[in-house]
Image (spheres, rainbow, N blue to C red):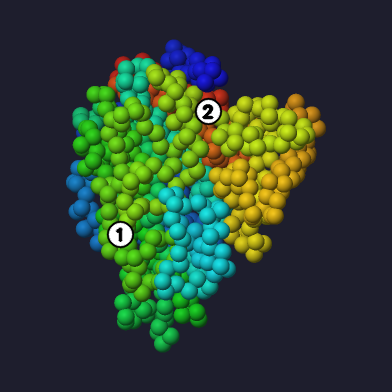
């Protein structure tokens, strides 16, 4: 703990310095915007955070839409076009298939009924947010000098928004459908048990092939349009690296364990790093509303932050919200499928996709009772359907953040949770000293099966309903005085077997380290939370060091003298990461039959470490000898690789040299875009996927991690600190294009100004929007 303590002043030092820095000259602007009911003020602070002061709550959300479009217009426009299936009309024919897939996953039910389910005050706020986005679009179209650079380079214009868009587009993803297909393919080989090497089931569960499924007939082709992958211009959407490393950390510390005597809430959501920043920070104020924090650009509301009553954060929970159904087609009519003993006809939707430079493309979308048809193969008498929570009535999450932001206390929040379909560990701490945790999200009620493999679509495995947060675990004012989540299996030990929501929880290493630190600190401080968010101690490294042979050469000697911290400046950390990758590859090659290696890929860290600690017959007739030989070979290979990549002198090795933080525009494959948007680079990083400072590895770069961080002093709000990589604006002409890149790389937190006095003392620009 001494090393963590020594970093505290450094990690919080920049916040104190920034608070004392002199304010820049005030820049004032006056503008008119359609859609407002009364005048609002937008006050920007030195960190690019807009503080919106409105006279009504909807007008505050109008302001949020306006400032998100001001700072991130191309980002939200590109994402909106993708969700609405309207990329081909501006980018060309190669995008048409992606547009068709996007439209396939639009909600097909009654939109009026969906809106009627939502309290009117939430709908009014969402409508105002959309109006704010459109007001900024109107502004830049009327004055092309304000257009973001991308539009001038590409010769396009931003697309206007509509409230219905938020309800129609549900953000449907493949979920774990590819996992289901992988397991079926392993089952066809008679090797289903090997799936536990790659993805151990948590809680423990026995994998079984569903009755009626022909596993041998399952193939990658069954994923259909789910296999389209990234968009033609590059990784505009999250890729496999982000998915593999996605996660988050959050903890709450109650007043009895806090150095401040008040609760502390810390949260650092792990998302993709390398393209557009996934969070935008804003402060919304109106009578009955005072909330600040990070939102997802393009969605109304704050996802992580605090109101004037309570702080809140989130991490991903795991609920299996998708199933892949296999349908039998009628040989006489491929537009029919067998369901509940008879042939049923697909619902068909014809849609026309506008295509730049070509004729519109006519597309047929099919739907079965379980959901959209992702693959239709009449020659095989086979189709597959993706059943998804997001496409169920009442499962739009577009207003979930608004509901949470407008809550006043824990009881209010429990009502708001009913509008939140995505699986989340929700963390809470309030000014009265309470803190709590509740899993929220919707779970399918399956007629039969566990969702781990594809299932026949004949009706036996259909969903019969949904469960909400009331069927999920939670805790309020835990006796130990703190609570943490890091995507680990946090189901109570006695949780009912028939209500297990998923089996895909992450490795427990981050959580175990967080728990180790919090349990050892009788009085946890804000600086402690900041230090813990940047903690690089690796539990897998500690375990592996203990297994190193006594005569392991210079590699083993270097690692035995290492503190197991994956710091950017550590040569031993670089050696460990190379050793870990090589050892995993050798272990996989040893225990996985060649025909299954393409399906298994890397084995899970916990599985590899268990095998190395307790070698068994899978390693051969003399398991311990085979283990030692494998360790020796990997140590030698890692040393050679480190020498080749970083030079022959180990004193010059650094993990950061292999772990750079480099951010580029998603369309940087277009030369004019690359020229206009400078690459944000120059820093390197410590950490890896299994340290609390989770920084996922993508080649020689950081592929994912906590781009947004917050530590909140509940009740003394101006003491709170945050970071948002690389800055608030995507415009290279803005001072906030990369102004948080260096602080983020160095772990220097910035102030989270909240009170009127604190904001007014630091404001650098003021924009007044008047209703038209």
Q: Residue at x 34, y 54 (%)?
A: 497
Badge 1 or badge 2: first in the primary sequence: 1
- Label count reads 2
Q: Is residue 96 visible?
A: no
Q: Nearer the viewer, residue 102 or 152?
A: 102
Residue drawn at x 33%, y 48% as measured from the top left: 495
Q: Residues within 10 Å of mark 2 (few under 14, many from 20)?
A: many
**Residue 694 appears left or right of 770:** right
> 350 and 403: which one is in front?
403
Q: Are marks 1 and 2 in contact (CB under 8 Å)?
A: no
**Residue 41 placement, left or right of 208:** left
| Position of residue 115 in the picture relative to residue 539 (left or right) | left
Mark 1 highlights which residue? 445
In the rendered image of this protein, does residue 323 appear above or below residue 115? Answer: below
Q: Quadrant of residue 266?
A: top left
Furthest residue toward right = 648
Give how far across and how far down residue 188 sits, in percent.
54, 70
Q: Residue at x 19, y 46 (%)?
A: 120
Residue 724 spot, x, y in % from top left: 46, 31
**Callout 1 crowding tier (Cα within 10 Å): few <14, some 14–19, many ≥20:** some
Q: CA distance from mark 1 to mark 2?
A: 39 Å
**One can see residue 491 in this view:** yes
Residue under label 2, please give it.
Answer: 535
For the residue labelled by badge 1, is the local secondary structure a helix, a strand or a loop? Answer: strand
Estimate the x, y position of residue 481 in percent, counting from the top left.
33, 26
Relative image position of residue 669 (x, y in whole percent): 61, 48
């Amino acid at each position: 703990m001494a090393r963590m303590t020594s970093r505290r002043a450094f990690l919080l030092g920049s916040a104190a310095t920034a608070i004392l820095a002199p304010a820049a000259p005030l820049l004032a602007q006056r503008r008119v915007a359609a859609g407002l009911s009364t005048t609002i003020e937008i006050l920007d602070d030195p960190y690019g955070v807009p503080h919106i002061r409105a006279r009504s709550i909807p007008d505050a959300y109008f302001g949020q839409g306006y400032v998100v479009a001001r700072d991130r217009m191309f980002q939200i426009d590109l994402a909106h076009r993708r969700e609405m299936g309207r990329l081909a009309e501006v980018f060309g024919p190669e995008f048409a298939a992606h547009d068709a897939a996007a439209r396939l996953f639009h909600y097909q039910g009654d939109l009026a009924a969906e809106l009627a389910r939502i309290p009117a005050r939430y709908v009014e706020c969402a409508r105002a947010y959309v109006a704010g986005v459109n007001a900024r679009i109107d502004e830049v179209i009327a004055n092309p000098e304000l257009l973001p650079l991308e539009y001038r380079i590409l010769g396009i214009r931003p697309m206007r928004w509509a409230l219905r868009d938020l309800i129609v587009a549900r953000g449907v993803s493949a979920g774990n459908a590819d996992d289901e297909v992988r397991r079926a393919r392993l089952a066809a080989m008679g090797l289903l048990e090997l799936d536990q090497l790659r993805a151990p089931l948590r809680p423990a569960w026995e994998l079984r092939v569903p009755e009626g499924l022909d596993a041998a007939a399952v193939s990658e082709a069954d994923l259909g349009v789910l296999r389209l992958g990234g968009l033609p211009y590059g990784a505009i959407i999250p890729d496999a690296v982000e998915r593999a490393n996605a996660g988050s950390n959050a903890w709450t510390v109650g007043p009895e364990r806090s150095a401040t005597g008040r609760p502390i809430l810390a949260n650092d959501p792990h998302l993709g790093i390398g393209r557009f920043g996934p969070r935008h920070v804003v402060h919304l104020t109106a009578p009955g509303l005072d909330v600040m924090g990070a939102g997802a650009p393009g969605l109304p509301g704050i996802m992580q932050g605090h109101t004037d009553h309570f702080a809140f954060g989130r991490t991903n929970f795991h609920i299996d919200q998708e199933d892949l159904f296999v349908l039998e087609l009628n040989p006489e009519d491929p537009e029919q499928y067998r369901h509940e003993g008879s042939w049923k006809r697909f619902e068909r939707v014809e849609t026309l996709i506008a295509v730049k430079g070509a004729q519109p493309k006519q597309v047929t979308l099919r739907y079965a009772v379980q959901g959209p048809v992702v693959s239709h193969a009449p020659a095989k008498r086979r189709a597959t359907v993706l059943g998804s929570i997001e496409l169920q009535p009442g499962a739009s999450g577009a207003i979930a953040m608004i509901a949470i932001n407008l809550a006043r206390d824990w009881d209010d929040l429990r009502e708001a949770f009913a509008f939140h379909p995505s699986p989340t560990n929700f963390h809470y701490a309030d000014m009265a000293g309470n803190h709590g945790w509740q899993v929220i999200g919707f779970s399918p009620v399956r007629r039969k099966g566990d969702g781990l493999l594809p299932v026949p679509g004949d009706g036996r495995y259909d969903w019969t309903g949904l469960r909400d947060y009331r069927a999920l675990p939670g805790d309020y004012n835990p006796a130990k005085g703190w609570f943490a989540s890091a995507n680990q299996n946090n189901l109570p030990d006695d949780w009912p077997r028939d209500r297990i929501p998923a089996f895909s929880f992450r490795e427990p290493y981050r959580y175990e380290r967080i728990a180790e630190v919090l349990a050892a600190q009788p009085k946890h401080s804000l600086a402690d939370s900041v230090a813990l968010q940047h903690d690089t101690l690796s539990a897998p490294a500690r375990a592996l060091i203990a297994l190193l042979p006594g005569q392991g050469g210079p590699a083993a000697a270097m690692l035995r003298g290492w503190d197991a911290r994956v710091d950017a400046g550590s040569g031993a950390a670089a050696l460990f990461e190379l050793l870990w990758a090589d050892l995993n590859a050798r272990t996989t090659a040893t225990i996985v039959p060649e025909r299954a290696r393409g399906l298994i890929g890397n084995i899970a860290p916990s599985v590899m470490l268990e095998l190395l600690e307790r070698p068994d017959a899978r390693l051969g007739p003399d398991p311990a000898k085979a283990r030692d030989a494998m360790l020796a070979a990997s140590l030698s290979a890692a040393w050679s690789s480190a020498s080749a990549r970083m030079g022959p002198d180990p004193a010059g090795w650094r993990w950061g040299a292999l772990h750079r933080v480099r951010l580029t525009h998603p369309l940087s494959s277009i030369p004019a875009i690359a020229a206009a948007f400078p690459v944000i680079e120059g820093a390197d990083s410590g950490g890896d996927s299994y340290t609390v400072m989770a920084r996922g590895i993508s080649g020689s770069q950081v592929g994912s991690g906590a781009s947004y961080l917050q530590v909140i002093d509940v009740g003394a709000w101006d003491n709170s600190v945050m970071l948002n990589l690389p800055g608030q604006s995507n415009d290279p002409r803005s001072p906030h294009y990369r102004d948080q890149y260096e602080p983020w790389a160095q772990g220097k937190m910035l102030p989270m100004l909240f009170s009127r006095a604190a904001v007014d003392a630091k404001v650098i620009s003021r924009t007044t929007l008047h209703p038209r």
